[in-house]
Image (tube, helix red, strand yellow):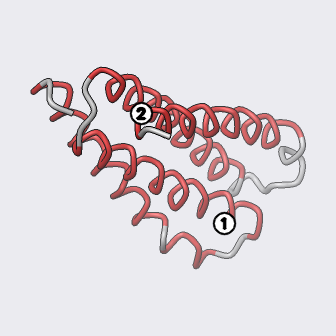
Amino acid sequence: MSAAKLWLALGALYGLLGVALGAFGAHALKARLTSELLPIWKTAVEYHFWHALALLAVGLLALQRPGTALNVAGGAFALGVLIFSGSLYALALSGVRGLGAITPIGGVLLIVGWAPLLWGAVTGRG
């Protein structure tokens, strides 16, 4: 599988999971999570879904001009969602505050992913 197809597939998978987890939070968890934990779940879903769209953008750009910058962006977004949103989902479900300590690592990866995407978009080099 080409890198472009990988980023498109991950973007679609993350999008599917983002919608499913958002609906799960809004319906199944709304009555179970505290007023403090429900916004954490919503933040996880929001960042999860926006970066699913970012992965789709990376995949579409990589179809036209594949390259290292776009692969770095895709990898950072994919791993960033797992760590950032994943730790927030786990925190919201468990209430274990210590899980929030790894959330910034995912956030940094999400930020890092935007730089090579910008580079690839502006320079025309993937």
How many other residues sit within 10 Å of disc 2, few (<14), some (14-19) or many (≥20)?
many
Instruction: Give the SS element for disc 1.
Output: helix
- Who is closer to the viewer here, 23 or 4? 4
106, above or below 12, in the image: below
Left or right of 16? Residue 4 is: left
User: Can you tell which quarter of the image residue 2 is in?
Assistant: top left
6, above or below 124, in the image: below
Left or right of 22? Residue 116 is: left
Rendered location of residue 79, percent (x, y): 47, 56
Rendered location of residue 35, percent (x, y): 74, 52
Rendered location of residue 114, percent (x, y): 28, 40
Lower position in the chain sequence, tag 1 or tag 2: 2
The amino acid type of the residue labelled 2 equals Ala
Instruction: Identify residue for label 2.
Output: 4
Instruction: Identify residue for label 1.
Output: 91
- Who is closer to the viewer here, 17 or 45? 17
What residue occupies the far front of the structure in this picture? 1
- Who is closer to the viewer here, 17 or 28? 17
Rendered location of residue 58, percent (x, y): 37, 32
- What residue appears at the point 38 percent right and 44 percent down from the top-left corner? 74
Left or right of 37? Residue 86 is: left
